[in-house]
Image (cartoon, grey):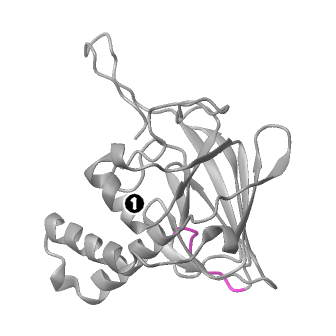
Amino acid sequence: MDRWIVEISPKPRQTTAFGRDVVGETMGKTIWMNYLSIGVDAKIVKDFENCRTNCRGLFCCQLVNKMWYGLWGFLNACYCTSISDAVTAEIDCGSGFQTLHIPDGLESIVTLNISKFGAGIDLWGTKMDGGGLNHPRCDDELLELVGVHGAPWLGMAKMSRECVDFPRMAQAKAIKYHFHRDLHMQLDGEAWLQPGSEQHPTVVHIYRDGAADMFQLDRKLHGNSTCNCN
C-alpha cells in the first residue's frame, strides 16, 4: 500500500496530526495513507468535533452521532465557498508539475489513496469513461483527485451512490496546493482550520514515500472473496 508524505507551510496549529507544536517551527510534515480533503466536508467534521468536545453528554451512541453529523451537514448546505476561487493546484503526472484546472462550483477537493472516503463513500466510482483515467488502486503510486459540489451531495451519496456524480479531476504522482484564504482541511478524519491569504498563502505538498506491506485474503482459500486496501 502506497505511503505519502504531506508537508504544510505554515504548520497547522489546531491538530495533532503533525506532532506537537515547536517554537519557531514553520512547516508541518507527516505520513498518511488514506485521504486528505479541503473544503466543506472538513468543516462539517470540525464542527462535529467542536460540538462533541463541548457537549459530550449529547453523543451517546453511533446512531445519535450520525444524526449530529446529518445536522452539521444540513447547516453547511449553504457553505458557498468556491474552491476554485480559493485554491490553486499543480499536479505531477510523471513529466513535471502542471497547473490543474479546478471546475467552478466545487466546495471540496478530496485527495484519495484508497477507494473509500469518510464513512465508506466511493467518490471515484466504478464506471470508467475513458479520458486517460484508470481504476484506482492503493498500490499504483498514484493519488486520485475528486471534486465535491457541496454537503448535500455527500448526504445523497450515502443514500444512493448512483444518484450523485463526483467530478474526477486527475490521477497524479505528486500534488501542490496553494490556499489564498482560510480553509478547513481534514487528514484521515482529523480536521482543522488552515489559515491562508493572497499575501501569505498556505502551501501543501504531497509526494510518495514508498510503500507498506499489508495483509490480504488468500482467494484460493476464500473462494470468490476479494480484498482491497480500505
Toward the viewer: 227 or 26? 227
Is 99 displayed left or right of 141 in the figure? right
Q: Main secondary structure of the magenta part?
A: loop
Task: Find out whether residue 229 is within the magenta segment.
Answer: no
Q: Amino acid at mark 1?
A: Trp
Task: Give x and y (percent) for residue 103.
Answer: 64, 58
The residue positioned farthest toward the right in the image shown:
96
Q: Residue furthest bottom?
A: 54
Task: Return the residue nearer the eye: 4 or 66.
Answer: 66
Q: What residue is rendered at 68% in x and 74% in y?
A: 86
Q: Residue at x 76, y 78 (%)?
A: 201
Vertical placement of 3 versus 110: above or below?
above
Q: Which residue is mark 1?
A: 153
Residue ranking furthest to the top: 220
- Segment tinted magenta in the rendering: 17-23
Q: Position of residue 220 (x, y in %)?
A: 31, 10
Towards the viewer: 212 or 45 = 45
Q: Position of residue 195 (x, y in %)?
A: 64, 83
> As displayed, is residue 63 above or below residue 100?
below
Would you say residue 119 is visible in this rendering? no
Residue visible at 38% across and 27% down in the picture: 216
The number of numbered discs placed on residues in the rendered structure image is 1
- The residue shown at (73%, 55%) is 101
Picture coordinates of residue 78, whole percent (x, y): 43, 78
Secondary element at tag 1:
helix
Quarter of the figure with the C terminus:
top left
Asked whether residue 57 appears in the rendered view, the answer is yes
Q: Which class describes the residues within 10 Å of circle 1: few (<14), some (14-19), or many (20+)?
A: some
